[in-house]
Amino acid sequence: MKIATFNVNGVNGRLPVLLRWLAEAAPDVVCLQELKAPDERFPIGAIEKAGYGAIWHGQKSWNGVAILCREADPIETRRGLPGDPDDAQSRYIEAAVNGILVGCLYLPNGNPAPGPKFDYKLAWFRRLTAYAAGLLDLKVPVLLAGDFNVMPTDLDVYNPARWQDDALFRPEVRSAFHALVGRGWTDALRALHPDERIYTFWDYFRNAWGRDAGLRIDHFLLSPALALQLAAADVDRAVRGWDKASDHAPAWIELAETGPKTGRR
DNA sequence: ATGACGTCTTTCAGACGA
């Protein structure tokens, strides 16, 4: 089973890119972020025509997350991250798909730091860490996938010194990520490629794509049982070079089929 | 320190992104 995450940066403006990538990559499950569209403007017709069922949590202009499932409808288990009833931003949606609980998230950017936006990022991170602990307690296969807006280590940044004070790389944010992962999750891309420079985002500015000046900020966190099934993980880099591309490229993992538990025959 | 570029908006300028 192939599961992907893709920050599309506008699901309607990006629809041709999304549909082309779905046809070429044929993922079984897709987590989308930055829909930048309210619920009623999610392009469900085109996505169904491409062979995918979907659930989505939209918002006008900004944010917005969705889960797509090939030839099936995701069973929604949650929309919105718990822990703050006043948080109106659409950044979390979760579903049961093919025997796995999939949480799709878009963690706040947090710039400029310090400031209220950075405080919101750290608070959101705390809520995620608390909620994720409960997910592990469920003892079912769980995957958290999405745009975490964090480069975990120097290896994940083309020029670490330049990003030192940025909300995506500040020590508080990196330690928040490591504290979350340290509770029992596996960073799938890094687990399979411990020494490789892997990027999932290239700025539109300064010819970042042409210079390969990238960041690794889109991640898959696997629960312990799921980590045992991890067979492959990579980034569809070429998509970043397409016409009208998102500033993110899709990342994906491949999970090996297990025995009777998830076998469908 | 700023802005480069791109997307969205009851648009033609401003907010936001990373």
Image (cartoon, rainbow, N blue to C red):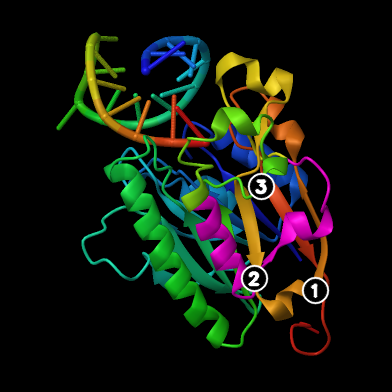
Instruction: Check disc 2 and report its element: helix, strand or loop.
Output: loop
Chain-order first, disc 1 or disc 2? 2
Residue B11 falls left or right of residue A229: left
Q: Are labels 1 and 2 assigned to the same chain?
A: yes
**What distance separates the C-alpha of mark 1 from that of mark 3?**
25 Å
Q: Look at the picture and state if A7 lies above or below A125.
A: above
As measured in the structure, the alpha-carbon distance from the residue carrying label 1 to the one carrying label 2 is 13 Å
Q: Chain of mark 2?
A: A
Residue wearing tag 2: A185
State how far apart marks 2 and 3 are (Cα): 16 Å
* Of the pair A221 and A89, the residue shown nearer to us: A221
Counting from the top left corner in percent of width and height, residue A258 is at: 82, 81
**A212 lies above or below A207:** below
Asked if disc 1 and disc 3 are in contact, CB closer than 8 Å, the reply is: no
Q: Which residue bears the numbered disc 1? A: A229
The residue beneath circle 3 is: A153
